[in-house]
Image: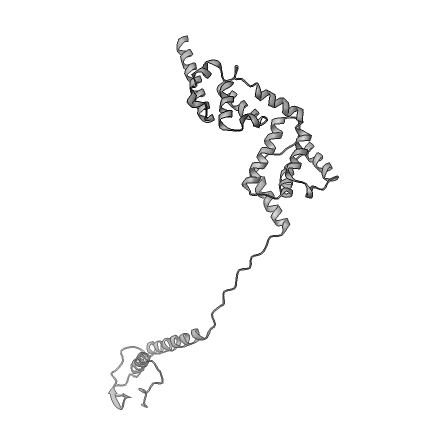
Amino acid sequence: MGDVGESSSSNPAEQVEDDTLLRDLITLRGVSTRRENVETPIEEGEGSVELVLNRLLQSALRATIATFSQLVPQPIPQPVVQVEETPSQKCLKLISGFSKLMPMMFEGGADLMVVDDYIDQVETHLTFMDVTDDYVKIVLATYKFSKDAKLWWKSFTNQYKVEEMSWEKFKELFYEKYFLVTKRWELRDQFNGLIQGNMSMMEYENKFTSLSRFAPEMVSNEVDKTWKFISGLDYKIRLLITAQYMKVYSKAVERALLLEAEAKDSNAGKEL
């Protein structure tokens, strides 16, 4: 045969592999190949012609793929474009979050505790959501209005520009409508004269907490708040609370509850 040993491959390893495959393809004993002017007898191959051809094709395919993989351009990563939310989308997002935190609706009415609780909860949730814009605060607060409150607010917005209103002005108008000044002073006086009387310790503490919001100047610091709570306790329990409980409200409440429980146990033992 011709000079099959003179391969055009530039890779020595590939050249040796191709020569070996070619030698396997030639099955006649005595035929030789030439490499560097030296004839080498080729032994009879043990594999079939089809197998050797497949191996040759696979070798050529690998070389072709390796060549083309270097020519194919790699994709260039595209920068991520941040899409800015529209004002409407931001508002809907805030309303959705606020509705999850604030499930209760405000219908209006004369229950002063409900009125004050509503505003208190609204402000708590607005702080949690980090809402600082006054107009957005008003939109969220009035979103939960229903029945009488919704009708009142609708008539108000037909006459005034809510966009220019501050949050403090909104609360002022809200309280003027549903929380008359005379009623607030009445609740303040109730707190000022609050005593335990026939109430249990838990009932007294709950009422103390509920009414204290209407007299903030009386509970402006921990010491004043604690003293006001202790001063309204039942006389026997008040005497047993020592000076060490006069400065921390939670400690005073805890001590009062324990003394009440001990008194009940003692009375129960006497009845037996």
Q: Nearer the viewer, residue 105 or 133?
A: 133
Q: Position of residue 180 (x, y in %)?
A: 67, 27
Residue 251 visible in the shown view: yes
Q: Residue at x 51, y 28 (%)?
A: 221
Q: Nearer the viewer, residue 131 or 81?
A: 131
- Tell me if 15 is positioned left or right of 156 in this view: left
Q: Residue at x 56, y 36 (%)?
A: 124
Compared with 235, 66 (above or below) is below
Q: Position of residue 127 (x, y in %)?
A: 56, 40
Q: Quadrant of residue 7?
A: bottom left
- Tell me if 176 is positioned left or right of 199 in this view: right
Q: Nearer the viewer, residue 247 or 179?
A: 247
**Looking at this rendering, what residue extends furthest in the top direction?**
271
Q: Position of residue 44 (x, y in %)?
A: 26, 82
Q: Quadrant of the C terminus?
A: top left
- The colouring scheme, among rainbow, by chain, secondary structure or one colour, is one colour
- Tell me if 12 is positioned left or right of 258 in this view: left
Q: Quadrant of the N terminus?
A: bottom left
Q: Residue at x 63, y 26 (%)?
A: 112
Q: Quadrant of residue 266?
A: top left
